[in-house]
Image (cartoon, helix red, strand yellow):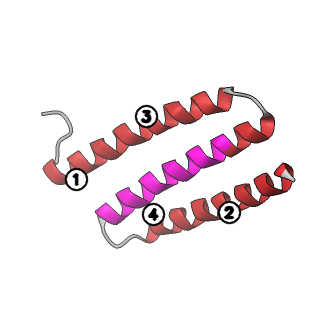
Amino acid sequence: MIEIALTIALGCVALALVLNLWSLLKGPTAPDRILALDTMVINAIALIVLFGIHADTSVFFEAALLMAMVGFVSTVAYTKFLLRGDIVE
């Protein structure tokens, strides 16, 4: 039963990732694209976690944690660059 749920969840998250890619490419403004990129990172983290559950190993959870930290820092950097034009003050 868990295999069916994991397959459905992987399909839904993959579909959300494709729709976020569409939003990233089509976004009318830069803040919309930054938001789409941040949402793509969250969906990628969800894919990693679901694959970790499927593979029954904890290595993927550590990778998801690292990706979450890198995604947060990159979102902050993109936003700061958009607002000020410079990342390092």
Spatial separation of the CA atoms under disc 2 and disc 4: 18 Å
The kind of residue on which mark 3 rests is: Met
Name the residue at 77% across, 52% down.
6
* Residue mark closest to the camera, 3 vs 4: 3
Q: Residue furthest front?
A: 1
Disc 1 and disc 4 in contact, CB within 8 angstroms: no
Disc 2 and disc 3 in contact, CB within 8 angstroms: no
Q: Secondary structure at mark 3?
A: helix
| Residue that badge 2 annotates | 12
Q: Is residue 81 magenta?
A: no
Instruction: Give the numbered dot on residue 69.
Output: 3
Spatial separation of the CA atoms under disc 1 and disc 3: 20 Å
Could you tell whether 4 is left or right of 42 in the image? right
The kind of residue on which mark 2 rests is: Cys
| Residue that badge 1 annotates | 82
Name the residue at 57% across, 36% down.
64
The kind of residue on which mark 4 rests is: Leu
Spatial separation of the CA atoms under disc 1 and disc 4: 16 Å
Name the residue at 56% across, 52% down.
43
Q: Residues within 10 Å of mark 4 (few under 14, many from 20)?
A: many
* Residue mark closest to the camera, 2 vs 4: 2
> Is 19 above or below relative to 52?
below
Spatial separation of the CA atoms under disc 3 and disc 4: 21 Å
